[in-house]
Image (cartoon, rainbow, N blue to C red):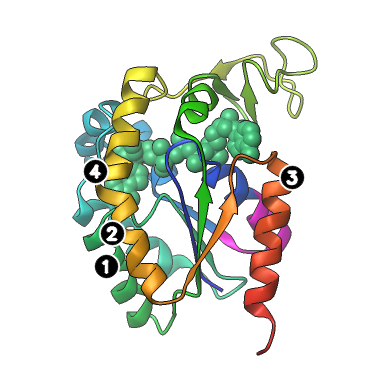
Amino acid sequence: MNIILLGPPGAGKGTQASRLEQQRGMVQLSTGDMLRAAVKAGSPVGLKAKAVMEAGELVSDAIVSGIIGERLDQLDGGGGAIFDGYPRTAPQADALDLLLSERGKTLDHVIELSVDEDALVDRITGRFTCAKCGEGYHDRYKQPATAGVCDVCAATEFKRRPDDNEETVRTRMAEYRAKTAPILPLYEARGLVSQVDGMADIDEVSRQIAAVLDRATQPA
Ligand code: AP5
């Protein structure tokens, strides 16, 4: 099963995609993670993407669809793909249809995480991760049990994303409203969209997503 998790910055796409990966054997394809890895490696894609990402704007359609195509070629069957942060524009949505059909695959479902934007600014500006294992924390909602020590791997270094300041988050939200939200009706017209309450707590959001996917995989 191939699904898209759609929602504005901070809606919980990454959180829920990594849970689905663990619980259902699906593979998370996060263009944000791929671009951050390219920036860190200093690759040609990373050099082009760095300033755009730090400004909260969108990287070019050709670049992101190119990296998604490469990753789809590396997928070996399994439980399918979770597209996290892709597609984000109408041309990316068209590109995804083409990339999937060229590989004999289909898009099976789109899950929209519906959220309140003001709460998201707080979610994003307060988050930080372990620099070693990537475990996620939050200034207010999830501090390590021992201050300054990662619960999972005991590392003592943490990091924050350079695009997680309030001004850039507002730009990312505006980009979402202008360029990404308009693709939802295209998927609704194909009967692919289910809405999940992204303001519920993380476990409840996971339960709602599981219920949607269970319904979608039941024989008619
Ligand atoms: P990307 O990395 O995709 O960032 P984003 O869409 O802005 O999403 P986030 O990662 O900020 O949020 P999320 O929805 O994954 O939420 P999370 O689970 O982390 O993209 C970054 C940049 O890369 C873009 O701005 C752009 O420049 C570029 N880019 C990427 N893809 C692109 C594309 N396709 N085209 C062009 N450019 C592209 O959760 C956030 C926080 O909230 C965490 O602290 C989490 O613990 C907490 N949280 C999650 N769920 C809940 C809940 N239910 N209740 C309480 N807290 C919660």
Marks 4 and 2 sit apart, C-alpha to C-alpha, by 10 Å
Marks 2 and 1 sit apart, C-alpha to C-alpha, by 7 Å
Residue 20 shown in magenta: yes
- Which image quadrant: the C terminus? bottom right
Residue at 22 percent of width and 28 percent of height: 51
- The answer to whether marks 4 and 1 mark residues whose Cβ atoms lie closer than 8 Å is no
Residue at 37 percent of width and 74 percent of height: 189
Q: Which residue is mark 4?
A: 59
Marks 3 and 1 sit apart, C-alpha to C-alpha, by 32 Å
Marks 4 and 1 sit apart, C-alpha to C-alpha, by 15 Å
Q: Tell whether circle 4 marks a residue whose Cβ is less than 8 angstroms from ligand 1.
A: yes
Q: Which residue is mark 2?
A: 65
Q: Tell me the amino acid under the disc marked 1.
A: Ala
Q: Tell me the amino acid under the disc marked 3.
A: Asp
Residue at 26 percent of width and 69 percent of height: 94
Q: Tell me the amino acid under the disc marked 2.
A: Ser
Query: Could you tell whether 163 is left or right of 152 in the image?
Result: left
- The answer to whether marks 4 and 2 mark residues whose Cβ atoms lie closer than 8 Å is no
- The answer to whether marks 2 and 1 mark residues whose Cβ atoms lie closer than 8 Å is yes
Crowd around label 1: few <14 · some 14–19 · many ≥20 (10 Å): many
Q: Which residue is mark 3?
A: 203
In this rendering, which labeled residue sits more in front, label 3 or label 1? Answer: 3
**Circle 2 — which element?**
helix
Marks 3 and 2 sit apart, C-alpha to C-alpha, by 31 Å
Q: Position of residue 125 (x, y in %)?
A: 48, 20
Q: Position of residue 71 (x, y in %)?
A: 41, 61
Q: Earlier in the sequence, mark 3 or mark 4?
A: 4
